[in-house]
Amino acid sequence: YEAVMTGNSDGLSATPSNWPNNPNRPVEKVSWADAQIFLTRLNAQQSANIPAGWAYVLPTESQWEYACRAGTTTMYSWGNDINSSRANYNWDGAYNTGVDFKQTRDVGQYAANPLGFFDMHGNVWEWTADWYQAAYPTGNPVVDPSGPASGSLRVLRGGSWNLAGTNLRSAKRGNNTPSFRYYIIGFRVGFQQVQPDRASPELVLSGGVEVTHVAGQAWAEPGVAAHDVRDGDLSGRVSVSGLVDVNRTGLYVLTYTVSDTAGNLATANRKVRVTPPAPTTATYLVPTAANLEMIWVADGNFTMGSPVSYTHLRA
């Protein structure tokens, strides 16, 4: 981490650890967003050595759990029990007592899981690529699922040194905002073939797809948000075509369009119905006319007269 992040232009520390001068410990006090900057720099620095179509990434939540379980179905990759010889966690239930380690430890102090990965359980929580969603994807079987295109929280996995053993279970899920940094959170780097991006962004129209607007009032765009699984927030790249003539009643259609980096297109339409102002009535008092009550008649259109073919009746 230090080698890659030294000299970064984002103002991030290349040595953010709460316990400096321990180069063999997992990096911590890095946010999900920091990890993305790290990966961008790593891929750029190693571009000459990376096979075409491959990249360093954060694993998805499903990839992380697959690697953690390593073919097991038990609570932990070693079985259903846990003790202080298995992982770095808060096994005595107290803080800063000196009974257990009470901070991160060098990687490899505990046995690897069946796939050879160290510290999948404990030491630090690890960011994954996915936005958090409460429910797992449905379907049978579910093949390599990824999280939704948008959200407010990113998924964390693995538990940490300051939490009880139940938080280290293979299935335990954590989450936090992408900007959050703390000395119990780090990340694990994956290297994988990046599949072609064929997923279109998601467009969400604030205020609904059908709105009513009163004629004569200025039009204010209700807003639109765009998110993409690969590119993240694309709201600033949405274009809008169509006009709303607030001086003429009728139905107008606005079309919203956005493309992601791979060229996948998303469109959405909003119908805007411009309606005449509601009729208004008011009572006016005329002091010099014995308080005559006047009724306001709003302007409008009508057909005056009648066709000559109408029969005139006489009494």
Image: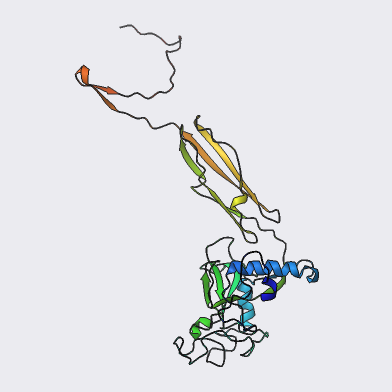
Figure check: 215 above or below 60: above
- Is residue 124 or residue 165 the one in the foreground? 124
Coloring scheme used: rainbow
Residue at 59% x, 38% y: name it: 242
The outermost residue toward the left is 290
Quadrant into which the N terminus falls: bottom right
Q: From the viewer's side, name the closer residue of 189 and 204.
A: 189
The answer to whether residue 315 is above or below residue 199 is above
Q: Residue furthest top?
A: 314
Q: In the drawing, does residue 248 fall left or right of residue 141?
A: left
Seen at 62% across and 55% down, the residue is 201
Quarter residue 110 falls in: bottom right
Q: Is residue 120 visible?
A: yes
Query: Is 173 situated above or below 82?
Result: above
Q: Observer-nearest residue: 104 or 305?
A: 104
| Residue 263 placement (x, y as % from top left) | 70, 53
Across and down, in percent, residue 47 comes to 77, 68
Residue 89 in percent (x, y) is at: 52, 86
Q: Tag count in the figure?
A: 0
Where's the C terminus, which quadrant? top left
Q: Nearer the viewer, residue 65 or 177?
A: 177
Left or right of 92? Residue 77 is right
Residue 1 appears in the picture as rendered:
no
| Residue occupying image coordinates x 27% and y 22% | 294
* Percent position of residue 176, x then y: 52, 69
Above or below 276: residue 149: below
Q: Quarter-wise, where is residue 114 in the image?
A: bottom right
